[in-house]
Image (tube, rainbow, N blue to C red):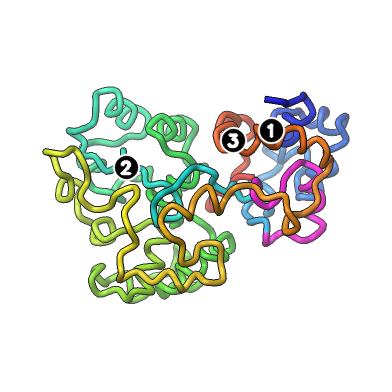
Amino acid sequence: LGFAEGTWDCFINHYDDYSWEELVEKGVAENYEGLGWTRDHWEQSNAVVGVPYTEARWWGQLTDTEKSVANGLCFFEDNWDKKDMNPNPSFFPYPIPDFRYRPWNELNPVTQQVARGRMDYNLEMWNNLGTSLVEKNSFFNLDPDQRAGAMELGFYTHTWDCFMNHYLSYYWSSIHEDLKVAVETLGWNEDMWSDEAEATPPSESKPWSDLTPEEKAAATRLCYFEEIWNERPITDWYDYDTSKNTAVTVDGPLPNDIDLAIFRNTGYAEKEPGSVGSSVYTADLGPSSHPLHPLLALGVAVGAFVVFYGAMWLAVTEIHVRQDETSGILC
């Protein structure tokens, strides 16, 4: 693949499996300190609760100084934000997890065992999306066994957080750019987003057919579609003869009543099906990217990195999983 120890540990692992002493020896402890980390954070000491606030920030929310020290850990915008490089022929922001839209009794025994044994699903909760407690958590707020089960089923961070959680467990401060456009278009504000708030926007009580084209676009960005929004069980929109769901297809055309123009100023705007995924969210080392160090090392590894990074970071999530307890943003 062209990796050497240094390029792998930096660009792929970001020194995640190093001890604090090894970080110091490597000369990168100060980079993590610049992002708010201490030895106690890193070693999950009882002396510290939680993780640095930078773990709940997108790249665009970091200061220039924080971006600079993150560059020294081989982070840049695309890999800090975990941009999705998987092919995506749909008009949703991420590939549709079609495997999740099969009724419980249509699952094979192995899949049922994973869903039941690792994720606490049963027939009722599986067939009624949004009713399981596990779906109230972001991907990295799942406990390790649940997260492993989600991965066995075929989920990863983006598909789980969008299609299962719909970003409901994110802090308001972790919602920006197209996500913020989406939630604000649906009428949410910071006060209502709080767990303690009783008020909800009018869109929450509307059936899909009553949403405006702009509201439908916003809901689409949060990975809702009509059947999920209207809380219909999977059994209502599954064709047992063809073994396919009748709600959405992985490569279906954008419906005429969804107006994605509300995202004209973000990275998810008026995209034709097939152009929302890998072509938009692939690492770009052109003028818009921040300088990386060491840049020459990236030249050796970039080909393999682009192809394999999306899969490889999943393999290290069990090592030093550093998460914001509510937002689930992993960096």
Extreme-left residue of the structure? 241
Q: Secondary structure at mark 3?
A: helix
**Residue kind at label 1, given as amino acid type:** Asn
**Most prominent secondary structure in the magenta stretch?**
helix
Residue marked by disc 3: 307
> Looking at the image, is mark 3 or mark 1 nearer the viewer?
3
The amino acid at mark 2 is Asp
Q: Position of residue 103 (x, y in %)?
A: 20, 39
Report, in whole angstroms, how far the alpha carbon at label 2 lies from the one at label 3.
Answer: 23 Å
Quadrant where the N terminus sits is top right
Percent coordinates x, y for residue 128 in the rendering: 23, 48
* Rendered position, 73 above or below 24: below
Q: Is residue 137 visible?
A: no
Give the spatial CA distance, label 3 vs label 1.
16 Å
* Residue 278 visible in the displayed image: yes
Determine the secondary structure under disc 1. Answer: loop
For marks 1 and 2, give the CA distance.
30 Å
- Residue 185 in the magenta stretch? The answer is no
> Which of the two marks, 2 or 3, is nearer to us in this view?
3
Residue 33's mark? none
In the figure, 83 relative to 199: above or below? above
From which residue to which does the magenta span run?
Answer: 60-80
Foreground residue, 303 or 323? 303
Q: Residue at x 37, y 47 (%)?
A: 96
Is 157 rendered above or below residue 318? below
First reached walking from the N terminus: tag 3 or tag 1 = 1
